[in-house]
């Protein structure tokens, strides 16, 4: 018997959670970076849903938590497309949606090389209240994160961001370098930044028996990121830089990752705590095209 | 003149067809990689470990029994795979075939790719 109030109590979030738990999951061997990109792209036809949370307390302001929810789809083996939805909550202030980003990553070379380039193109429509720190460019600093939400949300940023991602997989290591150029589509200068990362599983050999808390499921690494000034002042003065040890844990249906970023300059936040939770749905395209036709 | 041109075109087409028929995926593998042997082939746990790697990364496309979907995701129980050396298979896993939908698995540790090679050998 179907309860009469089923329609009223239907909760889309619960439905999605149930769907995720029921569906078979794929395991992408992705790195637990929060800012750096490697040349690993989403497998074609797969959809990854990931949240990246940043927690910090700018001096003279209140603690905040900012969340970016990422929908990442493998369009082709050489092309991945992503949508980010972002928001934040600041203690003793407010909670608000801060905007979205659309990004695409392309591998121009079809073969694996010692250094593999990926081209990254992004459009951002975010407010000044965005605090997710998904990249640091120009003279971004802690003062940008300290404004009250009521003031910061009035600033709208339409930005284009380009990245050159260079990445190498050597034995069990991944080493990645990102060079970032960002332009507010208003009349503001180009801003530059960087992100560097290195990571590897704690054990490179698979053990041969199913396990969750074993060394090959844990990936440890470190990333460093910061601003490099802008075309008006191409200098490291008043720029922010961070170094962040990180750890990732691959579970059967999810991937967890954590990091603590340590600010290295007076413009940087002292600490940024990050957590990530990812779930990958395999071959989503085949849901709509029949079981024998996935994206290729 | 036209007859000569037609014969030339026919001969050229025949050559191209023969070349295409005689070349295989493994002809592109560098000699150094082609000659490599699986360093983990003699380890007893390699096949079981490779089966788990297969389950985590390959099963979603190539299916549980590795027969693929009969279309773009090919069977891994094939003459093509049987004719390959261990080095060929490891090279292909590392490179992928991005233009045809096969991702590169260079992000797996090399040791796990060799374990996967051991598993793929075991199911032929």
Image: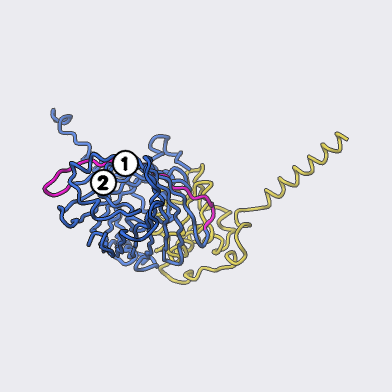
Between discs 1 and 2, the one toward the N terminus:
2
Chain for mark 1?
A
Judged left or right of residue A220, residue A8 is left
- On the image, the x and y values in percent for residue A36 come to 37, 57
Query: Neighbour class for label 1 at 10 Å: few (<14), some, many (≥20)?
Result: some
Residue A157 is labelled as: 1
User: Residue A128 versus residue A199: which sits nearer the camera?
Assistant: A128
> Do the residues indicated by labels 1 and 2 lie within the same chain of the protein?
yes
Q: Is residue A136 magenta?
A: no
- Do the numbered discs 1 and 2 sit on residues whose CB atoms are within 8 Å? yes
Q: Position of residue B109 (x, y in %)?
A: 43, 64
In the rendered view of the protein, which quadrant contains the N terminus of chain B?
top right
Instruction: Note whether residue B71 is visible.
Output: yes
Chain ID, mark 2:
A
How far apart are labels 1 and 2 at the CA level?
10 Å
- Residue at image point 17% right, 57% down: A59
- x and y, in percent, of residue A5 in the image: 13, 29
Q: Which chain is blue?
A: A
Write down the quadrant of residue A75 in the picture: top left
Residue A130 image label: 2
Instruction: Say what secondary structure mark 2 lies in.
Output: loop
Secondary structure of the residue carrying numbered label 1: strand
Of residue A156 and residue B6, the one placed in the foreground of this image is A156
Magenta part of the chain = A90-112
Q: Which mark is residue A146?
A: none
Q: How is the image coloured?
A: by chain
| Chain B pictured colour | yellow
């Amino acid at each position: 018997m179907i309860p009469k109030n089923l329609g009223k109590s239907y909760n889309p979030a619960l439905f999605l959670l149930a769907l995720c738990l029921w569906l078979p999951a794929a395991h992408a061997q992705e790195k637990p970076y929060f800012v750096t990109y490697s040349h690993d792209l989403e497998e074609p036809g797969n959809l990854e849903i990931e949240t990246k949370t940043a927690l910090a307390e700018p001096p003279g302001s209140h603690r905040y938590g900012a969340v970016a929810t990422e929908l990442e789809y493998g369009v082709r083996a050489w092309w991945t497309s992503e949508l980010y939805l972002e928001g934040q909550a600041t203690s003793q202030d407010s909670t608000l949606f801060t905007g979205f980003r659309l990004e695409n990553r392309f591998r121009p070379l079809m073969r694996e090389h010692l250094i593999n380039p990926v081209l990254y193109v992004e459009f951002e429509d975010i407010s000044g209240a965005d605090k997710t720190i998904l990249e640091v460019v120009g003279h971004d600093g802690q003062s940008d994160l300290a404004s009250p939400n009521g003031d910061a949300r009035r600033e709208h940023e339409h930005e284009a961001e380009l990245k050159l991602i260079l990445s190498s997989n050597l034995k069990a290591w991944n080493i990645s370098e990102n060079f970032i150029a960002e332009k507010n589509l208003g009349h503001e200068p180009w801003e530059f930044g960087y992100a560097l990362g290195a990571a590897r599983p704690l054990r490179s050999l698979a053990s041969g028996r199913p396990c969750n808390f074993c060394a090959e499921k844990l990936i440890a690494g470190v990333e460093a990121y910061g601003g490099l000034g802008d075309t008006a002042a191409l200098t490291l003065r008043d720029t922010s830089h961070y170094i962040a040890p990180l750890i990732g844990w691959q579970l059967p249906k999810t991937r967890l990752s954590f990091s603590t970023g340590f600010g290295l300059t007076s413009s940087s936040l002292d600490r940024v705590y990050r957590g990530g939770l990812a779930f990958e749905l395999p071959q989503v395209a085949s849901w709509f095209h029949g079981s024998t036709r996935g994206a290729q | 003149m036209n007859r000569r041109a037609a014969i030339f075109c026919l001969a050229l087409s025949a050559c191209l067809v023969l070349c295409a028929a005689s070349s295989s995926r493994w002809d592109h593998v560098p000699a150094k990689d082609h000659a490599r042997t699986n360093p983990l082939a003699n380890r007893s746990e390699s096949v079981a470990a490779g089966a788990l790697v297969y389950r985590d990364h390959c099963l979603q496309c190539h299916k549980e029994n590795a027969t693929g979907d009969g279309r773009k995701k090919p069977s891994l129980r094939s003459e093509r795979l049987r004719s390959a050396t261990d080095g060929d298979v490891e090279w292909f896993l590392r490179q992928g075939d991005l233009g045809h939908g096969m991702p590169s698995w260079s992000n797996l540790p090399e040791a796990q790719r060799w374990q996967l090679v051991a598993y793929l050998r075991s199911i032929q």
